[in-house]
Amino acid sequence: MMRLIMPIVLIGIAITLFFMLTNPIYGEISALNAQAASYNAALDNSKALEYERDKLVTKSNSISYDNLLKLEKLLPGNVDNVRLILEIGEIAKPYGMVLKDVKYNVADAKTVATEGPVVRGGGINSAPKNYGVFNLEFSTSGTYDNFVNFTKDLEKNLRIVDISSILFSSSNLAVVGAGAGVNTRTDSPEIYKYDFKIKTYWLKN
């Protein structure tokens, strides 16, 4: 009988020791292994990011200085609204067209995040975009031919400019003569007033 009881007692003691000592240690080892796996995954991701960064740096260094300047003008790192207005004025200058009534929202001229819709969990939330939008309004006057040429040059300008709308009205009254007689010239090209609404973009760092 004693021979039968002793193995049962030893088995019971072994089970008790397992739950009291071995099982907690095994749990700690499993947790440490999971934590180590997480660290290894983070390290692998870090190495992958460093590799991608190095590739981008290599590509960036391969771009010539002149092309970098062109890229900066194409999509600048800030609004630079003053330079934009001066550039448009220079584009209009050869056609005798002068910018007037320049308007823009001061808040648009600040480098702030723009929001765009994104679907999350069945609903639409706003997510920040990596670029900003600057809206600009101005008016100018000139012949239709000059207007067409100015618009083409504006669209071909290196900096991205989207024309949102154009309203035009006739302002032709070329007056000649003085004193008793005042006549209007019918042989001069008709002059129109053009109201532009445009938008441009900048890259947020």
Image (tube, rainbow, N blue to C red):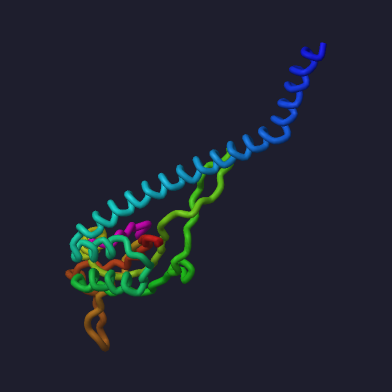
Would you identify the image quadrant in which residue 82 lies? bottom left
Q: Nearer the viewer, residue 150 or 14?
A: 14
The spot of residue 6 in percent (x, y) is: 77, 18
Whether 121 is among the magenta residues is no
The spot of residue 107 in percent (x, y) is: 48, 68
Q: Nearer the viewer, residue 101 or 11?
A: 11
Would you identify the image quadrant in which residue 101 lies? bottom left
Residue plotted at (46% across, 46% down): 42
Residue plotted at (78% across, 12% down): 4
Q: Is residue 169 visible?
A: no
Q: Nearer the viewer, residue 37 or 178?
A: 37
Q: Is residue 188 visible?
A: yes
Q: Quadrant of the C terminus?
A: bottom left
**From which residue to which does the magenta span run?**
157-166
**Magenta stretch: dominant SS?**
strand
The spot of residue 182 in percent (x, y) is: 26, 81
How many numbered circles does the render carry? 0
The residue furthest bottom is: 179
Whether 165 is among the magenta residues is yes
The spot of residue 77 in percent (x, y) is: 35, 65
From the viewer's perspective, tell me whether residue 105 is left or right of residue 146.
right
From the viewer's perspective, tell me whether residue 97 is left or right of residue 35.
left
From the viewer's perspective, tell me whether residue 13 is left or right of residue 181.
right
Would you identify the image quadrant in which residue 200 lies? bottom left
Q: Quadrant of the N terminus?
A: top right
Q: Nearer the viewer, residue 52 or 14?
A: 14
The residue furthest right is: 1
From the viewer's perspective, tell me whether residue 194 is left or right of residue 26.
left
The residue furthest front is: 2
